[in-house]
Amino acid sequence: QVQLVESGGGWVQAGGSLRLSCAASGSIFSGNVMGWYRQGPGKQRDLVATITSRGATGYVDSVKGRFTISRDDEQSTVNLQMSSLKSEDTAVYYCNAHDPRYGQDYWGEGTLVTVSS
């Protein structure tokens, strides 16, 4: 089992920045693909960004150039630096750990980001 705890959410004005962090504990596998997802009001949960164990990153088009995902395996953390925030970025952001060996996904409880225009 892997436990994930997000932090760093809050309220920010459009154009501002926030940094989300995800602390992992438990049976952490260094080969996990880590990711951030978000679920806006009345919407489904969508992928925002991923980072592999080798540091390869991927982003949904709507956040490219504005968001940066990073990981620190020694600290067992994954971060999402968000800048130039827009009202449409308002959502609950979830940390995800994907174990490719078994196709197992682990989720945090989420942290709310509210962007005011």
Image: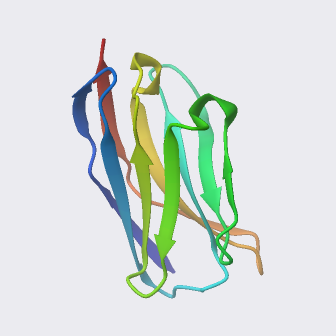
Q: Position of residue 73 (x, y in %)?
A: 49, 82
Outermost residue on the front side: it is 65
Q: Quadrant of the C terminus?
A: top left
| Of the pair 51 and 113, the residue shown nearer to us | 51
Picture residue at 64% right of the left edge, 71% below the top: 55
Asked whether, in this view, residue 103 is left or right of residue 83, the answer is right
Q: Position of residue 80 (x, y in %)?
A: 44, 53
Apparent side of residue 98 relative to residue 108 in the rendered image (left or right) = right
Residue at (24, 29) in percent of width and height? 12
Model colouring: rainbow
Residue 40 lies left or right of residue 110; in this view the side is right
Q: Is residue 89 left or right of residue 49?
A: left
Q: How many marks?
A: 0
Q: Residue 20 or 27: which is nearer the viewer?
A: 20
- Tell me where residue 28 appears, x and y as whole percent: 52, 85
Instruction: In the rendered view, tell whether residue 115 sits above or below residue 52.
Output: above
Residue 65 spot, x, y in % from top left: 57, 38
Q: Is 38 situated above or below 98?
A: above
- Residue at 31% x, 23% y is 115
Between 20 and 100, the one nearer to me in the picture:
20
Q: Residue at x 77, y 81 (%)?
A: 101
Whether 92 is drawn above or below 50: the answer is above
